[in-house]
Amino acid sequence: MSKWLLSAAAFGLVAACSPADAPTPPASEASPVLSYSDAFVMEPIGGRDMTMGGVTISVDGGDVILNSASSPSFGTIELHTMAMMDDRMQMRQVENFEIADGEALELKRGGNHLMMFDVGEGVTGGETVDITFNFEANGEPMTLVVEADVRVVGE
């Protein structure tokens, strides 16, 4: 399932409400279009207060920077990288991820991912949670709200 969202700058709304003879802004002023697929959160194991999640976010129409994520279902969400060093998994928090025009950022198990802390009670297998992703594009803020499936181990 893929979902689409235009920037809060609402370029399309401005263009749609302008008189027919009004000049059209150059394409470079249009906001990038974000889409997502495979949004998920793992149900915490054994009553732990932390978990991980992932999503694939694609962008068309300009570069964006993913700066943060938040959700009412979690106290904190961090952006993390993962790399194997000396046969050991090394996870590190990062400030952001850059996504180039026409590219996708894949956050997943065993790779770059989301770490969630202070997990709320509703994060159980079969449910869904909303996650808001905060981006920057051309110096302007953008958000993308995704609906993530809560998966149990083995899914």
Image: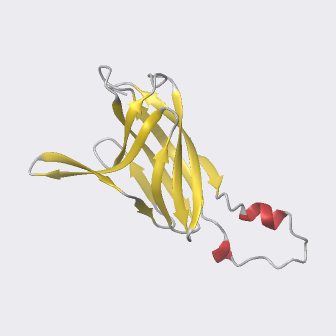
Which image quarter is the C terminus in? Answer: top left
144 to 27, vertically: above or below: above
Q: Quadrant of residue 53?
A: top left
The colour style of the image is secondary structure
Name which residue lies at 45% across and 57% down.
Answer: 67
40 to 24, vertically: above or below: above
46 to 101, vertically: above or below: above
Name which residue lies at 80% across and 67% down.
Answer: 15
Q: Quadrant of residue 23?
A: bottom right
Q: List x then y, in percent, for residue 132.
A: 54, 45
Q: How many marks?
A: 0
Q: List x then y, in percent, for residue 141.
A: 58, 61
Q: Is residue 139 left or right of residue 121?
A: right
Q: Is residue 38 left or right of residue 111?
A: right
Q: Nearer the viewer, residue 95 or 62?
A: 95
Q: List x then y, in percent, for residue 110.
A: 28, 43
Q: List x then y, in percent, for residue 115.
A: 35, 41
Which image quarter is the N terminus in? Answer: top right
Name which residue lies at 57% across and 50% down.
Answer: 144
Toward the left, the furthest residue is 86
Name which residue lies at 42% across and 40% down.
Answer: 76
